[in-house]
Image: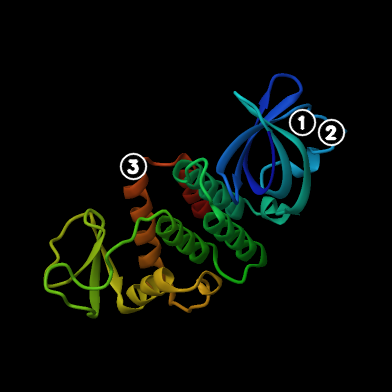
Amino acid sequence: MRTRTKGLILNEQSVGERDRLITVLTRDRGIVRCFVRGGKSFSNKSFAATHTMCYSKMNIFVGKNSEIVDDAELIRFFSELRQDIEKLALVQYMFEIAICCIPQGLDSEKQLSLILNCMHFLSTGDRSDKFVKTVFEVRLMLSLGFVPDILYCYGCGCYEADVMYFDCQKNSIVCSSCAKEGPNMLKLSRGALTALRYIIVAEPKKIFSFNISQESLDQLSQCSEMYVLSQINKHPGTLDFYKQVCTVT
């Protein structure tokens, strides 16, 4: 059987002397791993369209035990992100989370569109890297069915206060009066909480259309990161690398 799809190449690795194995986030089949026969050769017709950060159209032969790329046509290559080590590190982190979380065999148009939009904003610089990372983390978890309870304080029902907290264990907000001190309690200002609520309810095309102070963004970024880590139950090595790069740069 042969299938045609569009997908973003998240990872690639060498197989033997001639071939490559690529991991693709497709619109209609989730995460797909397929071989590119002779993929190391510049003369291969699919060479330019099957590298990491390529968004491509692909014809894939689906065999009993493996899948093979028949041909691929490049739609966009985010080459500019390879020129900035901080942006490159962030994209690698996003890709690792996607591979870890997005299932195989299911429609993944929401997740693919999200990552492509994030890469676009990283490319243009219209939003800071931390802004993009935060939106990515919240919306990816939301698209996979992990929805935090951020409407009312789970203790007293308070909707908003000057200071609220996000409880990473309960994935809910709690006011300062009900909160108990601990490493799982992350402070959220009014601006941070408002932004979090906006990211969750906004239409996909408008998720980057809000303003936030740097202080509130720092709080929200810490919150979204802890939320992702609590859901995937692992610590991605690419996150450590990204933070090291940010410290140096």
Task: Give the numbered dot on residue 239.
Answer: none
Amino acid type shown at disc 2: Asn
Question: Which of the two discs, 2 and 3, sits closer to the camera?
Answer: 2
Measure how far apart labels 2 and 1 are at the Cα level.
6 Å
Comparing 111 with 241, the one in front is 111
Secondary element at tag 2: loop
Amino acid type shown at disc 1: Gly
**Residue lying farthest to the right in this orientation:** 43
Measure how far apart labels 1 and 3 are at the Cα level.
34 Å
**Residue occupied by mark 3:** 233
Which color scheme is applied? rainbow
Task: Give the numbered dot on residue 39.
Answer: 1
Q: Give the tally of numbered discs.
A: 3
Seen at 70% across and 29% down, the residue is: 20
Q: Is residue 16 above or below residue 234?
A: above
Residue 160 percent across, percent down from the top left: 24, 79
